[in-house]
Image: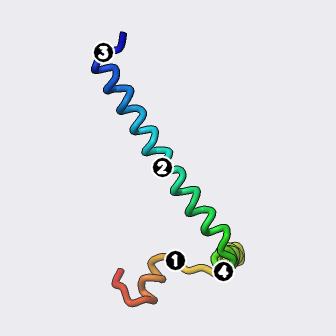
């Protein structure tokens, strides 16, 4: 026989599982949106090519370039 505490615990587990599923679904939707945007995919590919070719600057240099004090 289930006690009230066991039922509450089961409910808490169920609610937490639903929250995790919601988060995973939201993440999947965001991923699909990115994958369906050809401009974004092209920008990602170009960025990866830049990294492979060594066309990068340090974060500190980036901040300096854009007027932030380091």
Q: CA distance from mark 2 to mark 1?
A: 36 Å
Closest to the camera, between mark 2 and mark 1, is 2
Which quarter shows the C terminus?
bottom left
Q: CA distance from mark 3 to mark 1?
A: 59 Å
Q: CA distance from mark 4 to mark 1?
A: 25 Å
Question: Badge 2 is on which residue?
Answer: 22
Question: Badge 3 is on which residue?
Answer: 3
Q: Between 28 and 64, which is closer to the camera in this rendering?
A: 28
Q: Which mark is residue 58?
A: 1
Task: Give the x, y percent position of residue 10.
Answer: 38, 26
Q: Between 38 and 11, which is closer to the camera in this rendering?
A: 11
Task: Give the x, y percent position of residue 31.
Answer: 60, 62
The secondary structure type at the circle numbered 4 is helix
Q: Residue at x 42, y 34 (%)?
A: 14
Q: Residue at x 34, y 84 (%)?
A: 69
Q: Residues within 10 Å of mark 3 (few under 14, many from 20)?
A: few
Question: Badge 4 is on which residue?
Answer: 39
Which quarter shows the N terminus?
top left
The secondary structure type at the circle numbered 1 is loop
Q: Residue at x 51, y 77 (%)?
A: 58
Q: Residue furthest top?
A: 1
């Amino acid at each position: 026989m289930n006690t009230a505490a066991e039922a509450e615990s089961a409910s808490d587990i169920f609610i937490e599982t639903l929250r995790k599923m919601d988060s995973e679904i939201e993440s999947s939707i965001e991923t699909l949106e990115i994958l369906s945007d050809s401009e974004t995919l092209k920008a990602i590919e170009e960025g990866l090519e830049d990294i492979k070719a060594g066309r990068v600057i340090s974060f500190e240099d980036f901040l300096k370039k854009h007027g932030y004090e380091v």
